Amino acid sequence: MPRKLLLILAAVVIAGSTYAHGKWTLRWTGTGELEAAASSVNRIPKEFGDWTSEDLRASQRTMEQAGAIGYISRRYDNRTGGPSVTVMLLCGRTGPLAAHLPTICLPASGMQLATTQKLYTLPRDESRNWGQIAWGDFRGTVGGEPLRTRLFWAWSADGVKWESPTYPRMALAGYPHLYKVFVQREMEPSESKDTMKRGSLDEEPCVLFLREFLAEVKKAARDEGRGERPSPKS
């Protein structure tokens, strides 16, 4: 089976796991603020910097039942070479979007965590950062073929500051809506769980992509005229 198709199937696994959790979580209805935030997701450009992309198919019904009012699912390629990354960005009500943790749901879909979950502080520029992004390596079988992926994920209340709390439903419960991002790539056979012990994540392809991609998310979110971070409900 082509490796491109395996990554698409892996993205479907994430979507399906999100749906499974969302279906059992809070019921919600849209608001003007939520719909405005969700509409910003569709303004994320398909091309920026050296990155170009193609859309991946995602079931609108599945996304809506997962709590995502706005979403994109894409495969980005770098014109200068290197591995491709698949991206899923969701925006919706906090309850459903904060319920899903890949470390719990992906094992139920056949993808096991091959390393311990870790946190990485993602640089933004010389003096600021985007926040803490969770990441881990997963391995399993998708579509009957073995697959090893490196996955990064985080949540944001405003599309600017990102976080990956241990218990997101509790930590993020006060916000009316969230953005949620997944970025993954297929790992090479030569990569092992010890790879990151000998080096830094600063040159990791997913990290390099996220630094540029989150800047585009920020631009799109700011177009709606929101501030750095909405205040939690009392």
Image: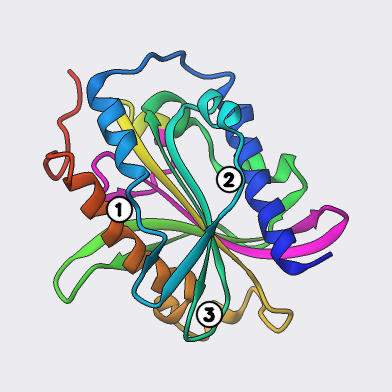
At label 2, which amino acid type do we have?
A: Pro
Q: Give the residue type at disc 3.
A: Lys
Disc 1 versus disc 3: distance between alpha carbons? 30 Å
Any mark on residue 197, and which? 3
Q: Which stretch did the figure color magenta? A: 139-168
Tell me the chief SS of the magenta region. strand
Residue 118 x %, y %: 48, 60
Which of the colour schemes (rainbow, by chain, secondary structure, one colour) is used? rainbow
Q: Is residue 199 left or right of 108 when viewed as pictured?
A: left
Real-space CA distance between mark 2 and mark 1, rounded to the nearest whole angstrom: 22 Å
Q: Earlier in the sequence, mark 2 or mark 1?
A: 2
Tell whether 130 sits left or right of 117: left
Who's the residue at 64% across and 28% down the image? 20
Q: Say the numbered circle drawn on residue 23.
A: none
Is 157 covered by the magenta stretch?
Answer: yes
Which of marks 2 and 3 precedes in the sequence? 2
Residue 86 vertical placement versus 179 (above, below): below
Q: Which residue is mark 2?
A: 102
Question: Which amino acid type is marked by label 1?
Answer: Val
Element type at mark 1: helix
Q: Nearer the viewer, residue 55 or 10?
A: 55
